[in-house]
Image (cartoon, helix red, strand yellow):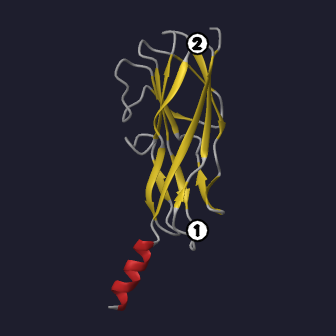
Amino acid sequence: MERSARFRRQRALATWLAITVLASAAGAQTISVVSNLSFGNVFPSVPKVISKNAAGAAAEFHVSGTAGAEVEITFLFLPTYLNQSGFTLSVLFSNTDCAMDSSATPNQSNPGYDNLNPWQPITYRLGMNGLTIWLGATAIPSIGQKPGSYSGPIQVRVQYTGN
């Protein structure tokens, strides 16, 4: 019985996380948020990785504009902490957490351009149907992580390079 009560207490500490994305575009192209980065349930002291290839969990953006035009994608802000009522939760974006595909049918599980560093500007050409960008991350909860819904902004800028 004591073992069952301990299991229930651990499940009650599950934390749901999402990152709200603020996107901006310069020029005639547009960027839209298809889905926010969502960690789902996270347990204290158990890191949770969301791969850029995880459909429905990874952040997904769509860029539209002039086909064949070169654009520079810059993540202006990637949070290191998510917030919830004065409490924080660590989040890590690695140098391979981004992927892109400009094909007519973007494939998240096998993107055209993979293992990109979101900490550096990325240059890519728009396809006939634009460009799809995916972003993953790792949530790193502490041993005493307070339960709740944590969130934080991601800011993305896409601009034409003139090439």
Q: Nearer the viewer, mark 2 or mark 1?
A: 2
Q: How many marks?
A: 2
Q: Nearer the viewer, residue 101 or 145?
A: 145
Q: Position of residue 54 (x, y in %)?
A: 39, 43
Taking the image as shown, residue 74 lies to the left or right of residue 3, namely right
Residue at 38% of width from left, 79% of height from top? Answer: 7
Residue at 65% of width from left, 9% of height from top? Answer: 162
Label number found at residue 142: 1
Label number found at residue 160: none
Tell me if mark 1 has few (under 14), some (14-19) or many (20+) residues whose alpha carbon lies within 10 angstroms of its own: some
User: Which quadrant does the C terminus fall into?
Assistant: top right
* Callout 1 amino acid: Ser
Q: Position of residue 132 (x, y in %)?
A: 45, 26
Q: Secondary structure at mark 2?
A: loop
Q: Is residue 26 above or below residue 6?
A: above
Q: Position of residue 62 (x, y in %)?
A: 47, 26
Residue at 62% of width from left, 62% of height from top? Answer: 85
Of label 2 and label 1, which has the lower sequence position?
2
Q: Secondary structure at mark 1?
A: loop
Q: Nearer the viewer, residue 6 or 45?
A: 6
Q: Is residue 156 above or below residue 26?
A: below
Q: Tell me how far mark 2 sits from mark 1, CA to CA.
A: 43 Å
Residue at 47% of width from left, 53% of height from top? Answer: 49
* Callout 2 amino acid: Ala
Kindly give the residue lying farthest to the front in the view shown: 85
User: Which quadrant does the N terminus fall into?
Assistant: bottom left
The residue that disc 2 covers is 28
Q: Position of residue 45 (x, y in %)?
A: 53, 69
